[in-house]
């Protein structure tokens, strides 16, 4: 068979440690290959070798049967390979159009200057082609996380590439946007574009993929045509065993009201109220742009609130900054862990202590012995896989980074934890572990206010669900009342 892409015996060692061991991959023209595996399985490393951002220890790459030697990402781009990374890669102070065409801005032949009219027009056409309603002249820093993801997709599509690597492309997209992306993928396939699709949302594979390939511990485990395999078989191949309970949730004792926010207004958020009780997981569900993240940021003091009232254990809260919220025992786990949640260049020890340093002061000194003991306890409690507390966070998998971020706030023993996308970019097994952590927190009497773009996650974990549409909470449901149809009906605003 004549393959568009062949990767043969790909191997990568770091300081004598093998992270990818003699892996083979093939890709046909117009094919969607789903590449799956737990965090740390080797998926990202294999794709870095293909995209030219990392050099292999050994192995060969062929495009149309001709061997390639990528020395940098530009070599791969020249050969028609583009990557949409899980961790967004954008210039925050430039416009959407400038980001889409970065490094290749159109220049007027007469004036020898950037042709801004053509730039904005071309970018708007690309956005329209993938069904994205964002202005090409908008500054990227003003966009939501989901909108930034869509800009990354538009950038890849604008290059007319032959191979597009999509690493968790739907992680921040709502149902409608995900459907639009799948329609786009279908059109790209018909035009002969091949796609390597990486996703922890296994249900997506059966919609978009032709074939699925599984990696585990840096090794090739197997591959099957998508029509010949089911979800349970994929999970067994990924983790080496069955996961019988993806959403573990014990019946917890729901206590008195811990937190309430009444008639919150500010920016897009209008007249929205929530109540969270002890031992309860409460979700705020909505489509992209509905205002859930803005709502959480206002509650946490990271965004200005124009009016409204908040109470914690019946006492009125005055929160004007995140420092105020932390001092009042409210925590917030943001959706972008690498940019707003963690300091990647610091150690696990430093990150876990990041919100609790004040608690270890002994006069002018610091109780380092207690610091070390508490960090060790948190590493064990959350089962963070690492070489030790001195390991830099950037060396961890996405799932273990998320656990470090949770540990940072749990260590502070907050009265309420707000969690925005608890399992974004996390593999199936680690998702279950995070669900177990959240459940155990509820058993201990913590209160959790959550945002998730994954409908099954919302329905399975939540004791109560509020629905937000166009900046306003317009419905609430108990666990027994909530259904996917009901949530979507109110989220769309029918």
Image (cartoon, rainbow, N blue to C red):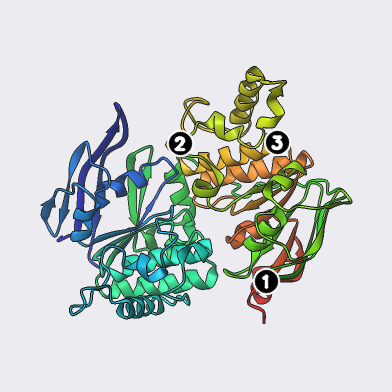
Pointer 3 and pointer 1: residues touching (CB < 8 Å)? Answer: no
Distance from label 2 to label 3 (Cα)?
A: 22 Å
Q: Mark number for residue 311?
A: none
How many C-alpha atoms fall within 10 Å of the one at disc 3: few (<14), some, or many (≥20)?
A: some
The percent position of residue 316, horizontal first and vertical second, equals: 86, 53
Q: Secondary structure at mark 2?
A: loop
Q: Is residue 437 above or below residue 125?
A: above
Distance from label 3 to label 1 (Cα)?
A: 31 Å
At a point 80% along the width and 64% down the height, the residue shown is 308
Q: Is residue 408 visible?
A: yes
Tell me which numbered mark, 3 or 1, is placed earlier along the sequence: 3
The percent position of residue 374, horizontal first and vertical second, equals: 65, 25
Q: Secondary structure at mark 1?
A: loop
Q: Which residue is mark 3?
A: 412
Mark whose residue sits in front, 2 or 3: 2
Direction from residue 459 to residue 67 in the image, left or right: left
Q: Which residue is mark 1?
A: 471
Quarter containing the N terminus: bottom left
Q: Secondary structure at mark 3?
A: loop
Mark whose residue sits in front, 2 or 1: 2
Residue at far front of view: 111
């Amino acid at each position: 068979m004549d393959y568009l892409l062949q990767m043969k015996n790909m191997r990568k060692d770091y300081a004598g440690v093998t992270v990818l061991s003699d892996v083979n991959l093939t890709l046909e023209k117009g094919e969607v290959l789903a590449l799956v595996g737990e965090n740390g399985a080797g998926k990202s490393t294999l794709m870095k070798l293909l995209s030219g951002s990392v050099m292999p220890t050994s192995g060969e790459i062929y495009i149309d049967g001709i061997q390639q030697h990528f020395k940098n990402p530009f070599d791969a781009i020249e050969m028609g390979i583009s990557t949409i990374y899980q961790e967004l890669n954008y210039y925050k102070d430039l416009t959407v159009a400038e980001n889409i065409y970065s490094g290749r801005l159109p220049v007027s032949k007469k004036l020898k200057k950037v042709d801004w009219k053509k730039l904005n027009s071309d970018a708007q056409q690309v956005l329209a082609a993938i069904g994205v309603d964002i202005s090409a002249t908008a500054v990227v820093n003003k966009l939501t996380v989901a909108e930034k993801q869509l800009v990354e997709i538009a950038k890849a599509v604008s290059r007319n590439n032959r191979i597009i690597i999509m690493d968790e492309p739907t992680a921040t997209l709502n149902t409608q946007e995900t459907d639009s992306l799948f329609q786009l993928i279908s059109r790209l396939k018909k035009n002969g574009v091949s796609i390597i699709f990486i996703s922890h949302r296994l249900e997506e594979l059966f919609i978009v993929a032709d074939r699925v390939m599984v990696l585990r511990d840096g090794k090739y485990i197997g591959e099957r045509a998508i029509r010949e395999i089911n979800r349970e078989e994929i999970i067994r191949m990924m983790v080496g065993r069955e996961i019988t309970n993806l959403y573990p949730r014990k019946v917890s004792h729901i206590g008195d009201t811990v937190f309430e926010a009444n008639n919150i207004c500010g920016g897009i958020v209008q007249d929205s109220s929530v109540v969270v009780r002890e031992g309860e997981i409460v979700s705020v569900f909505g489509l992209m742009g509905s205002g859930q993240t803005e709502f959480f940021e206002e509650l946490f003091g990271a965004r200005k609130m124009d009016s409204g009232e908040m109470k914690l254990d019946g006492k009125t809260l005055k929160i004007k900054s995140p420092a105020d919220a932390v001092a009042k025992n409210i925590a917030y786990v943001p959706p972008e862990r690498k940019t707003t949640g963690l300091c990647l260049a610091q150690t696990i020890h430093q990150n876990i202590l990041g919100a609790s340093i004040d608690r270890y002061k002994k006069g002018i000194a610091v109780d380092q012995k207690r610091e070390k003991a508490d960090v060790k306890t948190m590493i064990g409690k959350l089962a963070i896989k690492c070489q030790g507390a001195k390991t830099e966070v950037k060396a961890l998998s996405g799932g273990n980074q998320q656990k470090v971020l949770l540990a940072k706030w749990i260590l502070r023993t907050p009265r309420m934890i707000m969690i925005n996308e608890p399992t974004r970019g996390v593999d199936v097994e680690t998702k279950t572990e995070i669900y177990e952590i959240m459940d155990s927190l509820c058993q201990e009497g913590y209160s959790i206010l959550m945002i998730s773009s994954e409908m099954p996650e919302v329905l399975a974990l939540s004791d109560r669900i509020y629905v937000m549409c166009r900046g306003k909470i317009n419905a609430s449901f108990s666990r027994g009342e909530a259904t996917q149809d009901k949530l979507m009906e109110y989220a769309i605003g029918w």
